[in-house]
Every structure is written in structure tokens, then in C-alpha cells.
């Protein structure tokens, strides 16, 4: 991985520092630069196709504080979405939309997790606030507290203002990120599209000799991913 390659200079510098104490001060600055370079490389590496960064955090579910670990959902698909802040405006429309459609995700062996940089206490207060008063009410999935911003940073959605952008990731049963989108703060996401992408992902994973064209929905035609096989699809449209 890119992070391993970029971290290599740090190891070499560390060896040089060990030669004598007097060289340590001189080597300290380059070492810090090398570490920053490694972090940049890690952040630049695409998440799609890679193992999803694991995390353990406190979440609120059924109005209780629960410890949630991403890897506990291994064997299921996960829709992991980030939003900026509790008690805001666009956010409750997304959060309640995912909750209202939760049973459709559950039927596809999929868990939904919402994450923001708020504390679990803020999450609980928001859940205990009625929707008509700007709250989200009881939810069918956990809201994860990312107060230290470590999860948001790991998924590359932390904005310069210190809140999470509207990132959404679909993680498969093996813990691999298969889909990622990031919206800016002012506009929300579409649950229908998330379900459609999830269904397409599950289809191609269960039919590895087929691929799904643009806008594919269950029951629509697929195509063979080769020059000859694809002609059958193109001839029919």
C-alpha cells in the first residue's frame, strides 16, 4: 500500500538518529516531514476496493449507549454514512429517511450506521426530540459518536471546518469498501440511489460473470464484460 512505501523513509531516518545523540536534533525535522508525507499518502489512497477502516466507538441505539465496532458486522453489508452535525437542517431529513427505509436495507442483509462528530449525549438528546421540533425521534439504526474525529478522518470526509462532509460508503460482507460518495454540506443524499447501488453490488457479487450498466435496477438487463458478450446487450437497446 502507498502508506507503507511512504513510511519507509521514516524508518531509515530513525536508524540514522540512533548513530549518535548529536545527530538526533538534525534528523528530527526530516523525520517529521517523512511522517507527514506518510499521512498524506494514506489519505490519498482510495478507499474503494480496500478494507474499510475499522473503528470502535460509542453509539446511541434504542436510546441507550452501546459500544459499536465496524468489524462486528462482518458477514453483513454496511451502509456507513457521515453527516455534519446534530440539531441542524438537512441532516434530519437524511437520517429519518434512512430510518424509514431501514427494513428494505435489513431485507438485503445490510446494516445502516450514521456518524457525526457530535457526542453520544448530543445524539441521545436529538433522538429524544420529536421530528416536528427538529429532532429525529427513535431510529432503527445506531448513531455513532466521533467526538475525536478519528473515524471521519480515516474515511477522508473531515472538512477544514472540523465537521464531516456527507460521505456515504457501502461496505461488503468481507469488510471491503465497494462504493463511496461525498456530498458537500448544503445538499442531501438519495436513499433510493443508495438502495439501487447496493442491489447492483450484491447482484454482481453473486453473478461474477456479469456487470450492471448505468441505471441498472433489479430485473433489468445486465451485460457480459467482454467485447463479444457485451454485443448482446448493446444490440437489444
Image (cartoon, rainbow, N blue to C red):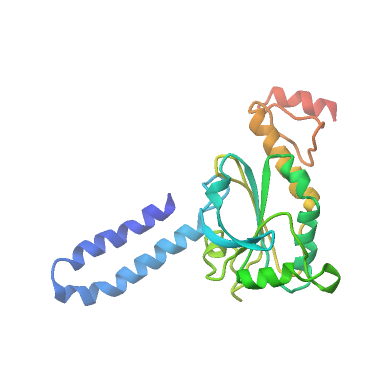
Left or right: 91 as drawn, with respect to 174: right
Choose top left, top right, bottom left or bottom right for residue 132.
Answer: bottom right
| Quarter of the C terminus within the rendering | top right
Residue found at x 67% / y 26%: 227
Left or right: 168 as drawn, with respect to 67: right
Residue found at x 78% / y 49%: 193
Choose top left, top right, bottom left or bottom right for residue 16.
Answer: bottom left
Give the x, y percent position of residue 153.
54, 64
Q: Residue at the left extreme?
A: 20
Left or right: 199 as drawn, with respect to 14: right
Q: Is residue 235 visible?
A: yes
Q: Is residue 156 visible?
A: no
Left or right: 31 as drawn, with respect to 72: left
Residue found at x 80% / y 29%: 221
Out of 220 and 93, give the one closest to the viewer: 93
Give the x, y percent position of residue 124.
68, 69
The mark total stands at: 0
Give the x, y percent position of residue 207.
67, 27
Choose top left, top right, bottom left or bottom right for residue 172.
Answer: top right
Out of 130 and 49, give the one closest to the viewer: 130
Give the x, y percent position of residue 62.
69, 59
Residue found at x 41% / y 64%: 37
Amino acid at each position: 500500500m502507498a502508506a507503507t512505501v511512504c513510511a519507509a523513509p521514516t524508518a531509515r531516518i530513525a536508524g540514522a538518529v540512533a548513530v549518535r545523540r548529536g545527530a538526533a536534533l538534525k534528523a528530527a525535522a526530516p523525520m517529521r516531514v517523512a511522517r507527514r508525507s506518510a499521512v498524506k499518502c494514506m489519505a490519498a489512497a482510495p478507499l474503494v476496493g480496500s478494507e474499510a477502516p475499522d473503528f470502535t466507538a460509542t453509539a446511541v441505539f434504542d436510546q441507550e449507549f452501546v459500544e459499536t465496532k465496524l468489524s462486528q458486522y462482518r458477514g453483513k453489508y454496511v451502509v456507513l454514512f457521515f453527516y455534519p452535525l446534530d440539531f441542524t437542517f438537512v441532516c434530519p431529513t437524511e437520517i429519518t429517511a434512512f430510518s424509514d427505509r431501514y427494513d428494505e436495507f435489513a431485507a438485503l442483509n445490510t446494516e445502516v450506521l450514521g456518524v457525526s462528530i457530535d457526542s453520544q449525549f448530543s445524539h441521545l438528546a436529538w433522538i429524544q426530540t420529536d421530528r416536528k421540533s427538529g429532532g429525529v425521534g427513535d431510529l432503527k439504526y445506531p448513531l455513532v459518536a466521533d467526538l475525536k474525529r478519528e473515524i471521519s478522518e480515516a474515511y477522508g470526509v473531515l472538512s477544514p471546518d472540523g465537521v464531516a462532509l456527507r460521505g456515504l460508503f457501502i461496505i461488503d460482507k468481507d469488510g471491503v469498501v465497494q462504493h463511496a460518495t461525498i456530498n458537500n454540506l448544503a445538499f442531501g443524499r438519495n436513499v433510493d440511489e443508495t438502495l439501487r447501488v447496493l442491489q447492483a453490488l450484491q447482484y454482481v457479487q453473486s453473478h461474477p460473470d456479469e456487470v450492471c450498466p448505468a441505471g441498472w435496477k433489479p430485473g433489468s438487463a445486465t451485460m457480459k464484460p467482454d467485447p463479444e458478450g457485451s454485443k448482446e446487450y448493446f444490440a437489444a437497446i
